[in-house]
Amino acid sequence: MISVATALEQLFALVPPPEVEDVPLTAALGRVLARPVIAARDQPPFAASAMDGYAVAELPVPGAVFRVIGTAAAGAAFGGATGSDQIRPGQIRPGQAVRIMTGAPVPLGTVFVVIQEDVTREGDRITVLPTLGTGTNIRAAGSDFRAGADLSAPRSLTPAAIALAAAMGHAALTVTRRADVAIIATGDELVVPGQPARDDQIAASNSYGLFALLQSLGAVPHLLPIARDTPAALAQAFDLAGAADLVVTIGGASVGDHDLVAPAARTAGFDLSFHKVAMRPGKPLMAGRSTRQILLGLPGNPVSAMVCGHVFLAPLIRALQGLPAAPAPRENAVLAAPLSGNGPREHYLRARRGDAGVIAFDRQDSALLSVLAQADCLIVRPPDDPPRAVGDRVDILSL
């Protein structure tokens, strides 16, 4: 058996350079940006008012009176006033004011925007009140970002990042292609959920949990028909997965009489990188590569499959889609209940966080999906970790 860290290193070594494509902003959410986005101009491209109020060309004081000579609105800059007191188009002089709205370009010569709550107005005259604030209420040109600033890559595109790319002047973004994943559940004991089952059969639950996990990661999962425990059925399943970037098998990865996935994978052209990892749950795990696909073979126990999905499948998908190859992120938490010493394998305990800290569930059997559904994290125990007391700090992996 190899360690979890070694297994991840070998798994990442199977990942080819990601392919890229251009998508419109409306299709970019959750995609991985492949190339930096460069701002075409300053934002804002002009000095703008931060408030509704009056633009003036001198620092105001309480009691000061200004004559309103025009209006500036967002998208409609002040063009100037008629008459001999205009210096040049769009400029104001001391003693003058321009009614201005939030986001509008400030007129030339503006040094202060008096907010509308700090003045009284009668006709074309405003008088500054004693409530006058000290801020200028002017956003300088380029105060958000300058032309040439970049939105760095790679990164997963959030709503805020997409808004920033739009503000930078881009209608489309270069992103990595979404990973296409074929899911093959194996075993004579499995039936499709909702279909009639014999007394010795169970629903193929793992497939749907992993399908949802893959969707949440931005991949494109496909559920293939359940493969029965025969070489012919497994060969057909691998053939059906021919267009996928990644083939995920569930079950049949151990060494029992009916564990046929490894030999079937070799027959399908996969060279296996590893087979068995020193972890619990999830020891019967394997990975490999053919000339055009990656294989990840997960254990069949429901919790084992889902834990390995978070520990191995999620980091693999992120790497396939152009994000840095890295283990699933961990946090540090305080124990709210003691833990006994750990054995020789890295252990992932289903747990839940509370006000007092994190506490592992009493039942940790790898078949108990009901416990996994209540968990919001996994406590990660290193091999041979000694007993832990309340208040000790442990690593956790969020679910």
Image (tube, rainbow, N blue to C red):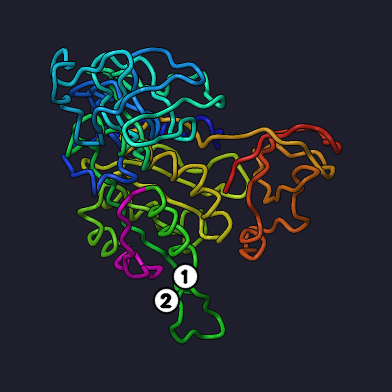
The percent coordinates of residue 86 (x first, y second) are: 16, 17
Nearer to me, 287 or 37: 37
Do the residues bearing badges 1 and 2 touch, measured as CB atoms within 8 Å? yes
Tell me if 369 is positioned left or right of 192 in this view: right
Looking at the image, which residue is at 54% across and 40% down? 277
Above or below: residue 350 compared with residue 390: below
Nearer to me, 295 or 338: 338
The percent coordinates of residue 238 (x first, y second) are: 28, 58
Tell me if 330 is positioned left or right of 391 in this view: left
Decide: few, some or many residues near mark 1? Use Cα within 10 Å; few <14, some 14-19, many ≥20.
many
Tell me if 18 is positioned left or right of 161 in this view: left
Nearer to me, 24 or 273: 24
The label number, if any, that marks residue 204 in the structure image = 1
Give the residue type at disc 1: Ala
Looking at the image, which residue is at 31% across and 32% down? 124
Above or below: residue 306 compared with residue 42: below
Tell me if 299 is positioned left or right of 336 in this view: left
Q: Quadrant of the N terminus?
A: top right
Decide: few, some or many residues near mark 2? Use Cα within 10 Å; few <14, some 14-19, many ≥20.
some
Q: Choose top left, top right, bottom left or bottom right for residue 170.
A: top left
One can see residue 152 in this view: no
Distance Cα–Cα, label 1 vs label 2: 6 Å
Q: Secondary structure at mark 1?
A: loop
Give the residue type at disc 2: Val
One can see residue 193 in this view: yes
Q: Secondary structure at mark 2?
A: loop
Q: Which residues are magenta?
A: 218-233
Q: Where is mark 2, residue-wise?
A: 192
The percent coordinates of residue 113 (x first, y second) are: 39, 24
Q: Choose top left, top right, bottom left or bottom right for residue 388.
A: top right
Q: Earlier in the sequence, mark 1 or mark 2?
A: 2
Nearer to me, 398 or 298: 398
